DNA sequence: AGCATGCCTTGATCCGGGTCAATTCGCACG
DNA sequence: CGTGCGAATTGACCCGGATCAAGGCATGCT
């Protein structure tokens, strides 16, 4: 609909939805899928996993999934749409902590404080699986695979949190950001070279700790260097190899 | 011994050691203490907790507790001394991830990859409690309090990891760093206004993503503003209130 | 249609902190 | 005792990215 002039070159990719529509088997691409498989689809434990999950949504762009200070009762797996998490300091400045794609999980950082330490805001129309944490925690005690899965998800997020820490150039940050997104889409089975940026330039900049103008300039330069094609929020990676090279300092392995 | 001229003003603080010397009860100030208490000192489960812990050390300054790529088998609680964790990228540049004081735990970020993603290096003579993770994990299945404790430690570390992410001035970073250290010492029962910096200026700078020269300049300025007294690595906070104010954007609540 | 609003892009200017360099200090060493 | 080395401090200079400002281009509202 938008970006008419690019429509021919960049046909709309299929909307990423991590839900096979089968209520019994949950989402095939969901972050919990391995836990579900380990538990066994046929075992009675699965019935319990069924009990503690609840489909919620839709949330419209700008709506909150949870807010800072809300008591922690559940974690959420994104079924469709995109979410940003953010903190707002007392001066009212926003700090974007992360973006979450279909199949990924939000709310893990609330386990310790027992209250959500940040807001979660939908960037477009979004649906979730809501997992009651007390129930999940109890289940984890009985099914080692579920416990292990929770440990792994928590530990994994520890690793990614330190990505944007280093002092890296704007080029490195933006390239790494694009390749990170591409990789995460690829894992869930979506196109790794052509996708829609659900977040504004301002959000990207805030997340990368840059000014929006800088992000804009870097993207323009990447385009002029034929590394990407971009119009509005529709993106195509023309030279992922080179991009990975630029952002390598920030990317895994 | 060192810093003769300051000896009168800054008498050596007691060396921070998180170990009450009672082998049966573990370290009273250790991060696991609440889990131990919850398990109950008298219950048979404690005997199992005993089995999976092992005192290791001493490690001398510069020695590795673990290295990048080592298979993950255990987490370590610092009993005495100080540790830095760091990554070394393929260009050989060091990236300091964190400093760990007596009572704190290292290795949690290795659960997911199953190999340590970073080095842990002793900054001074250090001793540890080594917790076998498979055993710990199994115990967590049987004792909900232990499972909850692991979840909480992981989630807590998620929160602190995002501290140094924001784009903050050198003053903010250094002030927040000093107050963070002070708070962590205070929690373990040591002086919050007078302590020894076990790490070099270079390590501090690397951790804060600043140049060593900048850290040096900021500390000099803080001293000339009568916010701190510092000579070599011996530090006294003269105006913690003001320091907290400067670093507030980076500090909890 | 006409206007407002938000998002994005591009240009001009400025400054915080990085880099390079010189010096000092403390300490281990022969 | 000097020598050498690493850590720390301080000064001079420079650059990447922030900030300020202006303009384009959608979309939504009246």
Image (spheres, coloured by chain):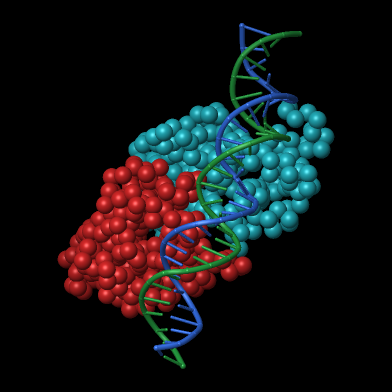
Chain colours: A red, B cyan, C blue, D green
Quarter of image, res D12: top right
Q: Nearer the viewer, residue B92 or A30?
A: B92
Residue A229, percent from left and from top: 30, 57
Q: In which quarter of the image is the C terminus of chain A?
A: top left
Residue A40: tell me if it is visible: yes
Quarter-wise, where is residue A137 in the image? bottom left
- As drawn, the residue found furthest toward the right would be B8
Instruction: Inspect this view and state whether residue A184 appears.
Output: no
Q: Depth check: A43 or A60 in front?
A: A60
Drawn side of residue A189 relative to residue B213, left or right: left
Classify residue A210 as left or right of residue B190: left
Residue shown at 54% from the left, 38% from the top: B83
> Between A176 and D25, which is closer to the camera in this rendering?
D25
* Residue at x 46% of width, y 64% of height: A202
Please identify the quadrant where the N terminus of chain A is shown.
bottom left
Determine whether A96 is above or below B24 in the image. Answer: below
Q: Can you say whether B10 is above or below A30 in the image?
A: above
Q: Who's the residue at 64% across and 41% down the image?
A: B215
Residue D1 is situated, as x and y percent measured from the top left of the image, at 76, 8
**Relative to A251, does residue B71 appear above or below in the rendering?**
above
What percent of the width, then of the height, locates residue A226? Answer: 30, 50
Q: Is residue B169 above or below residue A82?
A: above
């Amino acid at each position: 609909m938008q970006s008419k002039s690019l429509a021919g070159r960049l046909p709309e990719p299929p909307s990423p939805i991590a839900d096979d529509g089968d209520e019994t088997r949950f989402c095939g691409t969901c972050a919990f899928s391995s836990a579900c498989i380990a538990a066994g689809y046929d075992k009675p434990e699965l019935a319990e996993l069924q009990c503690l999950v609840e489909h919620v949504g839709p949330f419209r762009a700008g709506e909150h999934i949870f807010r800072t200070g809300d008591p922690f009762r559940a974690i959420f797996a994104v079924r469709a749409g995109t979410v940003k998490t953010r903190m707002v300091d007392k001066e009212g400045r926003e700090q974007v902590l992360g973006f979450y794609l279909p199949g990924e999980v939000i709310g893990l950082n609330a386990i310790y404080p027992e209250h959500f330490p940040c807001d979660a805001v939908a960037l477009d129309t979004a649906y979730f699986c809501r997992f009651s944490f007390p129930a999940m925690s109890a289940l984890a005690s009985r099914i080692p695979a579920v416990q292990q899965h929770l440990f792994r998800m928590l530990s994994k997020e520890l690793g990614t949190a330190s990505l944007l820490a280093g002092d890296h150039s704007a080029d490195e940050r933006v390239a790494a950001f694009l390749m990170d997104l591409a990789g995460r889409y690829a894992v869930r089975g979506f196109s790794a070279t052509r996708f829609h940026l659900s977040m504004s330039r301002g959000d990207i900049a805030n997340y990368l700790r840059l000014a929006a103008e800088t992000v804009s300039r870097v993207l323009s330069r990447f385009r002029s260097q034929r590394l990407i094609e971009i119009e509005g929020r529709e993106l195509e990676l023309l030279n992922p190899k080179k991009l990975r090279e630029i952002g390598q300092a920030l990317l895994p392995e």
